[in-house]
Image (cartoon, rainbow, N blue to C red):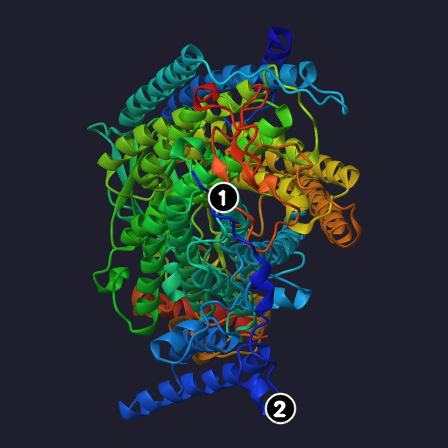
Amino acid sequence: MVLVGAAVGVALALVAVLIPWLPPADSTEAVKVDNVYWFVTIICIVIFALVAGVSLYAVWKFRAAPDDMDDGAPIHGHTGLEVVWTAIPAVLVTAITVYSGVVLTEIDTVPKDHRVIEVTGQQFAWSFHYPDENVTSGQLALPVGQTVEFKLQAKDVIHSFWVPEWRMKEDAVPGIVTDVVVTPTKEGTFTLICTELCGLGHALMRAQVFVLSASGYEKWIADAKAAAAQAGSAAGKTLFTQQCGSCHRLADAGTQGEVGPDLDKVLVGKNADFIHESIVNPNAEIASGYQPDVMPGNFGDVLTEQQLTSLVDYLVKTAGKR
Amino acid sequence: MAVEVRGHEHVTEHEGPPPRRGLRRFTGAGWLRVLWVTPLSFLLATALVVGARSALDYHPLTEFQVLLTAWMIIVPLGFLVAIGGFDYWAYWASGRPTRPEDHSGHGARSWKDYFRVNTDHKVIGVQYLVTTIFFFVTAGLMAMFMRAELARPGMQFVDNNTFNGLFSVHASLMIFLFVIPAFAGLGNYVIPLMIGAPDMAFPRLNALSFWLLPIAGFIMLASFLVPEGGAFAAGWTNYVPLSVEQPPGNLFFQMAVQWAGASSIMTALNFLVTIITMRAPGMSFWRMPLLVWANFATSTLVVLATPFIAGSQFFILLDRVLHTNFFEPGGDGYALGYQHIFWFYSHPAVYIMMLPGFGIASEVIAVFARKPVFGYRLMALSLMAILVLGFSVWAHHMFVSGMSPWLRIPMMATTMLIAIPTGIKVFSWLATLWEGRIHFKTPMLFALGFVSMFVIGGLSGVYLGSIPIDIHASDTYFIVAHIHYVLFGGSLFTIFAGIYYWFPKMTGRMYNERLGKIHFWLTFIGFNVTFFPMHWLGLQGMPRRVSDYADRFGNLNFIISIASFALGASTIVFLYNMIVSWRRGEPAPGNPWRALTLEWQVSSPPPIFNFDEIPQVVGSPYEYGVRGARHAVLNGDRAEVPEPEQVISH
């Protein structure tokens, strides 16, 4: 029995170590979370090996021949054993609870010098406001090694903010502001995933995350400011990439969204009035094969009149007249 | 003590009222009356809405949701009246003569009796099981569609809206129309027999609670037919504000839950009263089989918790139809309030879907290991501990929801505590095997499969109970893996164990053992290959409830889909075995498993009132291997009653 249990334990340990179960840990929080994960894994392997050892041994050793009409030994219980298997799990789960509680407190703590980024979830796109630099973008950029407190809000329904490599996740809930703290430790491009079912485009609600060097971050901010200062259809293109591209495909902007109609097709021959109406009042005319109430109806309020004009100009130029 | 001998000769004299002829056939309870009353109630509901809205100077028809709500309340009521669910009470309340001694609606003499309002708990049990297996197959087919879509990244067969509808209806049917009522069906059949009672305490209520169930299932399925937007597609959790903003299909979830919930509350009350008041003489609580204990705990959970989900869905209904603002943040509602109310039911619901399975596993393992259940009293007490603790852990579903941060650590502590009574149960089952004489019949295979799969589900539950890990893993495929290890590996395996175990008792015929074993191994292997890799998918970054995913997960999802089709195919073996064995299986003896509990001491199937003579319980139900020990004395078989001091009680 001990052999069976030990064999199962070793096999499980190999499975746990050799298969990369977790993605890379690219934030200080991720390292702490992974420590809890390994702590729980060790306990679970021991318990599972014990259970598997006893049960595999028992079903082999105590199997009965089909014509065996005898009964087993009339054992009704054993107080000592029952106390042991109540007490040991109690100790183990207490240990897990205490360790998890300590780590939770650590990863929740916001250091004094930290950056704040305001994140807004909306069907089916994320937008990020950098209050220190007064920049808003559809992409998330942050400097490596600095703690960031994300203040999460949602405009319509509940969304959830998750970057697997950071291990951190928090829902963005309409009506309240929630927060999550991350200290990225590795430069690179990551994906921000919405993990709370938010409607038809849920599977596609993603945003790109750039963790940059300090200088790279400054350059990114400068570029974003320059893009915001553009006028006319150049500004329209930027706006489109940030606000519309996650749902709509448009060759000129290089966007691949599939939630809403392909604008290269549905806007052919449409004039500025139609495009303007479609943005501020999306239910006015629904492209065939699509449903009403999927596209947010508040772009008329979100965008300034000037932004709206440049967006319409851009769309007329690229998709409308052909 | 003197045991009253109740002959049943007089029962057969009651042939019921003379058959109705001509047009009067349409006024008596039954399907002919359903034919005209149901359309009439549809017209009545429409007229009520149109009349009321016109009187209030609203456009009578523009609010489609108001019409839908009225239809989904009044049409089912009309159906229930027509099928005869209220006939006895209506006669009694209106002062017309009732027929208290008429048992014409009791027991099944032909297959037609299964399609009527029937007050026999054995008929109702079979009605429940056949109905729930129908919905199990339907919901399983939906899972096959989902796996077909997920076999490759990108969109293949269905659009996002259909996909969201599929997983929402799949989960809702599996939970509300399969796992919960399948246990209610098994309990309905077995519990009165196990405690030595002639029937449930309230047979007419029992009949009515069954007929609410197909209504709930029909409503859920019908939601696919809603012209605008199709089925409800906000998940079975139906979180606000998404659910409030959904197309009208979402109403179908709110109303179906009311009907299914009312059904389970009524059944649970019936179980509680039956178990408390109708145990045979001598059956103290400490002599009850563990399945009875489990149903006692489950029914308590149902009665206390189910009103919360009913309330939560009514609030959404009001927010949608009457434009109240319980949860809508735009009108000072609180979106997280919904989640607290919802999980206050839905966490206990996990135990509603688990505890009866614990009971079945205890029965099956004791019988097929030929040993007393190890630590019987602690097994019963751990059920009660789970019942109490089950109400204190709901917010562990909300660790990343943005709820008050202080609530997290207390909820983690109580969540971890639940692992202790659960562990006690697993260790006691293993100890029951020790020094046993284990016979690997199909029910035993499923019971042992349940224990091993439930250990995996329980351990992944410990991962999720730890908040730092949960922050990473929640709302990913890790959750999908976890709930299927608990509800498929746990609940469904025990339902299969129970169906195979009591099949001879219910049908009077043996199932095919070979097919049963093939079914088990196909299910066991298909299940593990389908769901185990999902742990990896979730931890690596695949969120749940998506129709499309990152390309790098493509190969594993393809393997999962193939395995899930094999898993689906295993159900064909099960259905074939059940249908063919029911019709042509070998006749079953009264007690093919040499079990001690009372249901096996009568013929298969049992007599119409279960016991010709109320049994006298004299000892524990699990005294396997104890020489001279008896659980009960039946049929005047008094010679072998041991003297009280000889009874080995635990």
Quarter of the image for the N terminus of chain A: give it.
Answer: top right
Q: Chain of mark 2?
A: B
Say which residue appears at 44% left-offset and 12% top-offset: A81
- Measuring from the top left, give residue A314's x and y in whole percent: 46, 67
The picture places residue A253, in percent across and down from the top left corner, at: 52, 58
Query: Could you tell whether B482 is left or right of A185 in the image?
Result: right
Along the horizontal axis of the image, is A26 left or right of B610?
Answer: left
Which circle, 2 or 1, is nearer the viewer?
1
Query: Looking at the picture, does residue A294 appear above or below residue B82?
Result: above
Say which residue appears at 43% left-offset and 62% top-offset: B205
Residue B22 is tagged as 2
Residue pointed to by mark 1: B196
Q: Give neighbour class at mark 2: few <14, some 14-19, many 20+ (Cα, 10 Å).
A: few
Q: Nearer the viewer, residue B489 or B125?
A: B125
On the rendered structure, is B2 left or right of B407? right
Label 1, secondary structure: give it: loop
Q: Nearer the viewer, residue A25 or B225?
A: B225
Q: Position of residue B552 (x, y in %)?
A: 62, 38
Quadrant housing residue B528: top right
Look at label 1 and name its amino acid.
Gly
* Crowd tier of the residue under label 1, counting other residues whose Cα lies within 10 Å: few below 14, some 14–19, many 20 or above: many
Residue B644 sits above or below residue A300 on the image: above
Residue type for callout 2? Gly
Q: Quadrant of residue B601?
A: top right
Q: Secondary structure at mark 2?
A: helix
Residue at horizontal 68%, vertical 13%?
Answer: A61
Chain on which label 1 sits: B
Rendered-image quadrant of the C terminus of chain A? bottom right
